[in-house]
Image (tube, helix red, strand yellow):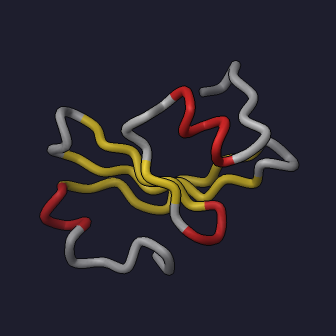
Amino acid sequence: MEKTIYATPQALKDELRTASILKGGRVVFNVGGNKYRVIMAIDYQRQLGFIRFVGTHAQYDQINAETV
């Protein structure tokens, strides 16, 4: 992702089809065959991403992905 530019959430989704787009510029990525989840807050204008959560699918189920 460091070398790719995603101008919009839809551009990211078009390339990374398993990503889930949430409110507030957040994206959930499935890792390891959906065993793990990573939540990033992305500022598309500045092309910056902030890791907000890394954990198992079970841990992900216990949080609010839009506020973590």
Q: Seen from this angle, which residue lies furthest top?
A: 3
**Residue drawn at point x = 50 percent, y = 80 percent:** 67
| Residue 3 coordinates in the image, percent (x, y) | 70, 19
**Residue drawn at point x = 30 percent, y = 51 percent:** 37
Q: Nearer the viewer, residue 15 or 59?
A: 15
Q: Give above or below for 46 relative to 59.
A: above
Q: Give above or below for 38 relative to 18.
A: below
Could you tell whether 27 is left or right of 1 in the image? left
**Tag count:** 0
**Residue drawn at point x = 79 percent, y = 39 percent:** 7
Q: Nearer the viewer, residue 59 or 6?
A: 6
Residue 19: which quarter of the image?
top left
Q: Seen from this angle, which residue lies furthest right?
A: 45
> Which quadrant holds the N terminus?
top right
Q: Give above or below for 10 relative to 28.
A: above
| Residue 29 coordinates in the image, percent (x, y) | 39, 45
Could you tell whether 9 is left or right of 54 in the image? right
Could you tell whether 3 is left or right of 54 in the image? right
| Residue 15 coordinates in the image, percent (x, y) | 54, 26
| Residue 39 coordinates in the image, percent (x, y) | 45, 56
**Residue drawn at point x = 19 percent, y = 67 percent:** 59
Residue 2: which quarter of the image?
top right
Could you tell whether 4 is left or right of 39 in the image? right
